[in-house]
Amino acid sequence: MTATNKGDFFIEANSVYNVTDKEYENVELLINTAKAFARNTYQCVYIIDYFRKDFLYVSENLALLCGEPAEKIKEFGYDLYIKHVPEKEQQMLLEINKAGFHLANTIPPEERVQYTISYDFHFINGKKKRLINHNLTPLLMTRDGRIWLALCTVSLSARNTPGHIVMKKADESWFYEYSLETHKWTKKEAEVLTEVERDILRLSSQGYTMNDIADQLCKSIDTIKTYKKRLFAKLEVKSITEALSYATNYKLL
């Protein structure tokens, strides 16, 4: 297997040219906005700069995930993935990076900021190996429609395996799903949940037991179990945690 280098993540599809110092003067507001967002979420947050090919900002809580100070992570930039992601999955990230930007470049420039790509991979911190969910969305575009800055959020994944690569447009019911087997994107319609299914997920996220949910919805425990079984089959998940993660990622609630 070929060793991964930082430069492998930067290809023609995500190359950015001619960003001026004057344009960087306006970036501080975006960094402060990202800091405010990081203070109000459990997710780790960082900003990728595709012109300088590094990280522009890293939230402090990312340090807890990888065991490195935030300032050090910022210095690492894309070397962070080489240091903390299993080698096999580094190759997966390279493929996602290439496929994601190739798809993004087929989308009209004015619409690209409305898309988010999501995928799961393992992150290593010493002897600990955690599966994380990573979301990336354009934050600032260049005048010629290329992604200059991207906002990334990281949280623990509810899945059991890496992959699950999806690109979704805000406020749309459809999404693109990428297969690591066929190496192709497929456009799909998101599942539609019934009101009872959404209630079960919402109440479960609040810590209600099955009996509590049955009481809240004025239904028998057997009826709730049936709804839950159908919900798991519909979303192709095995636990309520996975179902909540899926519903959150696909904005079904």
Image (cartoon, grey):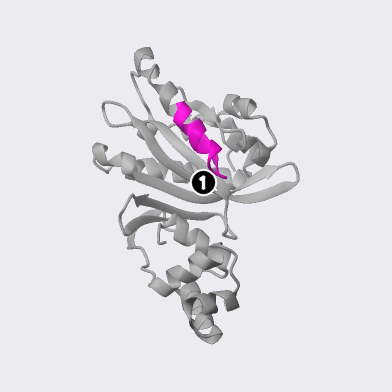
For label 1, count other residues whose C-alpha is less than 10 Å away and answer few (under 14), some (14-19) or many (20+). Answer: many
Q: Which image quadrant: the C terminus?
A: bottom left
Q: Is residue 128 visible in this depiction of the protein?
A: yes
- What residue sits 49% from the left and 83% below the top? 219
Q: Is residue 228 above or below residue 7?
A: below
- What residue sits 42% from the left and 24% below the top? 29
Q: Percent position (x, y) of residue 80?
A: 60, 34
Name the amino acid, label 1.
His
Q: Is residue 184 magenta?
A: no
Q: Which image quadrant: the N terminus?
A: top right
Q: Is residue 36 magenta?
A: yes
Q: Relative to 234, is 17 on the left or the right?
A: left
**Residue labelled with disc 1:** 134
Q: Percent position (x, y) of residue 115?
A: 35, 45
Residue range (magenta) = 31-46
Q: Is residue 179 visible in this depiction of the protein?
A: no
